Amino acid sequence: MTSFTTHIPTADLTPEPLDPSQILSGTPEVTGKVLTESPDGRQLRGIWQITPGVVTDVEADEMFVVLSGRATIEIEGGPTLIVGPGDCAVLREGDRTTWTVHETLRKAYAITLP
């Protein structure tokens, strides 16, 4: 891999359709772009965006930084995270989450898959 730079706010993203069973409210749309992937496919670094709505997910080990937008992330049996521009969040593998996206949210992420 070669070193590089990407302007995250204007990066072109590709549609990543949600499973309809994940959508609880609204018509959220997800787009993203994997910037780097380790040879074994377990380490991913990229950009992810979601439009307003309410969705559920089961998380991987992830650290992300919100560039724009706002969301409330409820973790089943855990804390509720309120994130916006400049916030860094860490999610644990297996966390069952409900994302209420108030404003289109764009984040840069680093994920470790099992």
Image: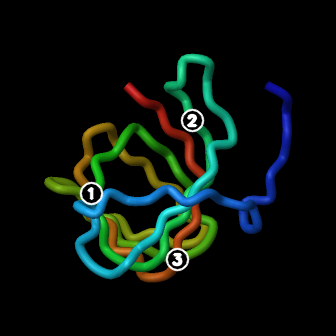
Quarter of the rendering occupied by the N terminus: top right
Q: Which image quadrant for residue 80?
A: bottom left
What residue is at 56 percent from the left and 57 percent from the top? 48
Q: Which residue is mark 1?
A: 97
Q: Which image quadrant for residue 3?
A: top right
Identify residue type, mark 1. Answer: Thr
Could you say where residue 19 lies in the image, as x and y percent from the top left? Answer: 32, 57
Could you say where residue 54 lies in the image, as x and y percent from the top left? Answer: 31, 73
What residue is at 50 percent from the left and 46 percent from the top? 63
Which of the labelled discs sits on residue 104, or is there none?
3
Could you say where residue 71 lies in the image, as x and y percent from the top left? Answer: 42, 73
Camera-nearest residue between 88 and 94: 94
Q: CA distance from mark 2 to mark 1?
A: 20 Å
Q: Which residue is mark 2?
A: 44
Render colour scheme: rainbow
Mark 2 is surrounded, within 10 Å at the Cα level, by few (under 14), some (14 to 19) or many (20 or more) other residues, namely some
What residue is at 54 percent from the left and 76 percent from the top? 69
Report whether 47 appears left or right of 105.
Answer: right
- Earlier along the polypeptide chain: callout 2 or callout 1? 2
Camera-nearest residue between 44 and 29: 29
Identify residue type, mark 3. Answer: Thr
Mark 3 is surrounded, within 10 Å at the Cα level, by few (under 14), some (14 to 19) or many (20 or more) other residues, namely some
Report whether 67 appears left or right of 54.
Answer: right
Camera-nearest residue between 25 and 78: 25
Report whether 7 appears left or right of 33.
Answer: right
Q: CA distance from mark 3 to mark 1?
A: 18 Å
Mark 1 is surrounded, within 10 Å at the Cα level, by few (under 14), some (14 to 19) or many (20 or more) other residues, namely many
Q: CA distance from mark 2 to mark 3?
A: 22 Å
- Label 3 with label 1: CB-CB less than 8 Å: no
Secondary structure beneath dot 1 equals strand
Identify residue type, mark 2. Answer: Leu
